[in-house]
Each structure stands twice: as C-alpha cells, then as structure tokens.
Image (cartoon, helix red, strand yellow):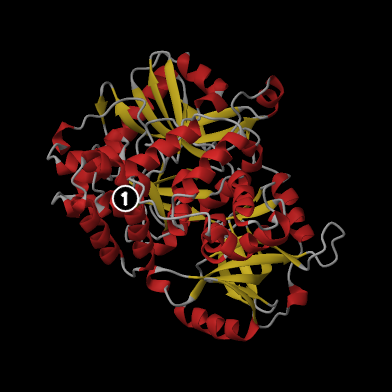
Amino acid sequence: MTIKPTNTFYTLSRIAQTIGETRGSHAKIRICAEYFMQLDNDTDLRLAAQFLGEGAFSDLSDKRTTVGSRTYSTLAAEFCEIDYDMVFKPSKTALGSASETIEKLLNNIPEAQKKWSAHGLLLKEIEDIFEELQSVSSRADKQSILKNAWAKMTPLEVKFFLRIMGRGSLRIGFESKSIISSIAKAFDKKVKDVRYVHMITGSIGKTALLARNDQLEDAQFKLFQPISFMLASPVESRSVEDFQEYLVEEKFDGMRCQIHVKQDKVHIFSRDLNDITHSFPEIVSFFRERDLPEIILDGEICVFRDDTIMPFQHLQKRMGLKKPTKKILAEYPTLLISYDLLFYDGEPVFEHTLIERRQLLTDLSKRHNFPITTQHYIQNKDEIDTYFEQALAHGNEGLMLKHKHSTYEYGQRRKSWLKVKKPGGSIDTIIMYAHAGSGKRGGTYSDFTLGVSVRDDERYEEEFIPIGKAYGGYTDEELKKINNRIKEITAEKYGPTLGLYPDIVIELEFDDIQVNKRTKANYTLRFPRFKAIRWDLSPNDVDTLKDVERLYEEKLNQQRLAQDQNPSFQFG
C-alpha cells in the first residue's frame, strides 16, 4: 500500500511545528485548514483534528494513557545512554519541557541516532499505540511500548507524540478555538455553526467530519456530554460603558465545574471536561436527593465548613482522589454553588439571555433547595468597590460582572463576562532561563523561568530554584531591553533556551500559591505575570523560598467572613 504523506504522523508533526513557528492567528489557521482539506479519509481527518485539539483520545472516551513524566523521561535517558540525574534532569530544567528535551537528545546524541529511523507511521497506527498504552498498567510495559514506538519515529514525532499523549497544550499557540476556525475555513462553514456543533457533540474530531460531510445540522445535544465553558475576560482589558447592563456576583475561590443530572444519574465535569464525579460523592448524593428535572448547571465547587468558604488549598486535598476517605470527607466537605443553567426540561437554553436563564435557575433552586450565587443589580462603579471588599472579606477571589442580555457564549472569552480580581501577592524573583517565543514573539526570548533564593536554606545546595514561568506583563520596549541584557548574561544555551547568570530581578505578581510536590520548591505560583522589572535590585534582593512558604501559610490562615453576613450564595 502506498502511504500518502498527508496521513502520516510525521506530516501532522511538521504541520504542528510550522504552526508554532508562524506568526499571526490567520496564517496559522490557513496552514491547518489546508492540511485538513488534504485528508480525504474520514479516519485520518478525525484523528488529525483530535490529536491537534483534544489529545490521544476524544474527550468523550474517558480513556487516558496515564504515562507519567518520570516513566518516559527515564526511558529517554536509557534510550540515549545518558545518566538520568546528571544529564537528563539538568537538560530538562534548562529547557523547561521534557518533550523538547527528549527531541533534542534524540537528534544530537550519537547513541540515540542509531536507534531510531523514520517509518512514516500512519495516524491510525499512532492511535493503536495510544490504545495499547492505556491497556497496560506497569511502568515496564509502558516503557516497552514507548521504546518500540520511538524506534519508528523521528525526534520531532516523539516530541508531539508525548505532548498529545499528555493531553496538554501542544505549545504551538494554537488552541481549540483556532482548530474550530480551521475546520470552518477548510469546509466553507460558518465559525459559529462549527463552534456550536463542537460544543454540543463534545468532540472536535466528530465536528470535523460533520463539517466536511455537510452534516452539521444533524448534530444533537446529549446529557452527560460535557459542554465547553463560557469564559471571562479581565475587566481591565475590556472597557465598561454602562455598569447598569451588568449583574454582579462574587468569584469563588474554588474549582469550576459542570453538573449533569437525570433522575438519580449525576455526573460532574471539570473545566477541562474530565469526569470528576468519583472525587465528590457528597455532591452526587446531594443532587440525587433533590428530585430534579433533567438539567445541566454551571458552577463552582468549594470546601465549605463552619458556614465559611475555605481557601482553595483545602480543595486541593480533594482534587484527583478516586475515593476520598471518611476522614477526608469530614475534614474537607464540599459544596457545589451554581450560577448558570445550560439545559432544562429536555432543551438547551444557551440562547436564552442571562436574565432568562437566571430566572429559571432561581425557580429551580427554590423548588429543589440547592445553592446558587447571590446576584446584585448595580448602578455605578462605587457599588462594585463595595461588593469587591465584601468578596475579599469572605475569602473569595473578587467579583464577576455578567451582562444581563448575554447568551451562554461557550468556549469564548468576550465582554459578556468580566472578572474583577485582586492579585494574590507579588515577590521579587530572578530570571533563571529565557525561552524563545513563537508567533508574534518569534525571534525574541519572551518566556521566562523565574526563581527564588535558597542561598541560606540548609535544604538546598543551589543559589536559586524555579518557582514559576511567566510570559506576559511587559511592554515591547521592556522586552527589547531584557533581550539586550540577556546577550550579556548568557551562561549556557540549550537549543531555544538560555541559562542565565543571576542578574535580572522581576517583581512577579500572582493569583495564588499552590502546593506542588513535583517541583523542587514544592510550590508553584498560580497565573504568574510580570509586575515590574526591577533594574534597581540585585540578586541579593530576591525573595527566598521561606518567604513563599510564609505567604502560603498567611493565606491559608486568613480570617474569613462567615456566610451569615451578606452571603455570597443562598439556598432557594
């Protein structure tokens, strides 16, 4: 059988790499659309869209490869015949990406070069490898499958194979909304129609097939099929001309979720559309007892104890648990607080206005006694300031402003929902590594790994250790100045990554501090971004890991206003 170049995994990898190196969203979409148009087999089109937009498996499949980073990283060290601790780990730290590290090692180490060759694996063969990986449980079996697969791939294919397998971003500046636009362009459809079908089917691969076969109108919504969430924009990035057009509610310090209910069948889905039902049995039991009609609710899961919403760090104790113990359930009881209604009485209600959806939600809450957010009509900015201080007193993140007449704009980030938040704090950090940007930032170093000081910390031998990565918050002029300085302080180069001598101090702003045992610091910053480039400070002024630990404890122990005073949610 003759293998067409378009249906090989190498071609998909080359397309992904090209998209990542291309500036401008329109140009990226054109490249992807042309690729989709060349795939004349339904299976190939489905898999191409799925691999680029969802991962190894469709979001609807509930399948996962569950291959940990250490599993494929130690295999890579063995494959390349290098020491894992002395060579691989430092290389990974420098690049900030295991998949990119493996690509470069396979390309440049002679021992590795002898072990791989391009076999032109088909997209279907890659799917079969993913299926095989998810069917085994032992590390040895997974490494055996990976080793055999890598021997038939180029280093570029291995990089994207790992990224697709991990279901994370492909790191090419091309997410689901751009793939939807590519499908629309490839098959001459309206973007809004393709977006709607993706939302109700939950599968980007299936959406691509329906678009090509002129069957978008055949798509039907089903319960227990997660829907793309409506997203919010920062209020500072969108001007508000008339505050009276918005409703305001508190933004909870919890986890966004979607709950589907049909009689005693209850499923909970996370923001990334994963089924997390098993982690929250008390919420499932609560909604089973409500005698509800068929509904889908959009809301937030919070740890709620002593009439108080507890810090997000408490919720972390519950996240990812397949079967929480009685002790965990007692110490960290959760509550799902709803703020929107997406499906009611057998019909989607996405096209209803917020006020209409809210009235339905309120009526349901009164009849069935489940918690919903407290919403307020507002007249001016002064009222927002008052409600904002109240939200912070409750321990919540801030406020949400929601346009009264907006529909549910699934998967979009527009002006209809605006978030008003106060930064969780800021610390002075050092730039440890600079990573080459892509897209409009191509040709410059625009992504940075920031570190804190451990010079006087008996637990560490280094001077600085990473605490987070940031790629925004600076102006073009500031970025140019940073890049000029980087030329003078480069210590090492690892492909597109530079290791730097300690020199540039950044005041880094963040939303929160989270425990992350997979990092050297045991903590990571949530949504870090540049607040200021402190040219006036030296590496001696950088904050320490102990400062981070202190800030974490302060947030954890912050006094919170109980819900009996100006409650942010209510039952019925």
Label 1, residues with CA under 10 Å away: few <14, some 14-19, many ≥20: many
| Numbered disc 1: secondary structure | loop
Q: From the top left corner, tell me how far across and down residue 304 is, in percent.
A: 61, 31
- From the viewer's perspective, is 475 left or right of 358? right
Is 191 drawn above or below residue 61 in the view shown? below
Q: Is residue 410 visible?
A: no
Q: Is residue 221 visible?
A: yes
For the N terminus, the quadrant is: top left
Report x, y in % for residue 214.
Answer: 12, 40
Image quadrant in which the C terminus is located: top left
- Residue 13: x, y in percent? 37, 56
Residue plotted at (26% across, 32% down): 349
Residue drawn at x 55%, y 86% as measured from the top left: 484
- Residue 7 or 277: which is nearer the viewer? 7
The x, y position of residue 70, in whole percent, is 63, 46
Badge 1 amino acid: Thr
What residue does disc 1 label? 8
Q: Is residue 482 left or right of residue 216?
A: right
Q: Residue at x 35, y 24 (%)?
A: 295
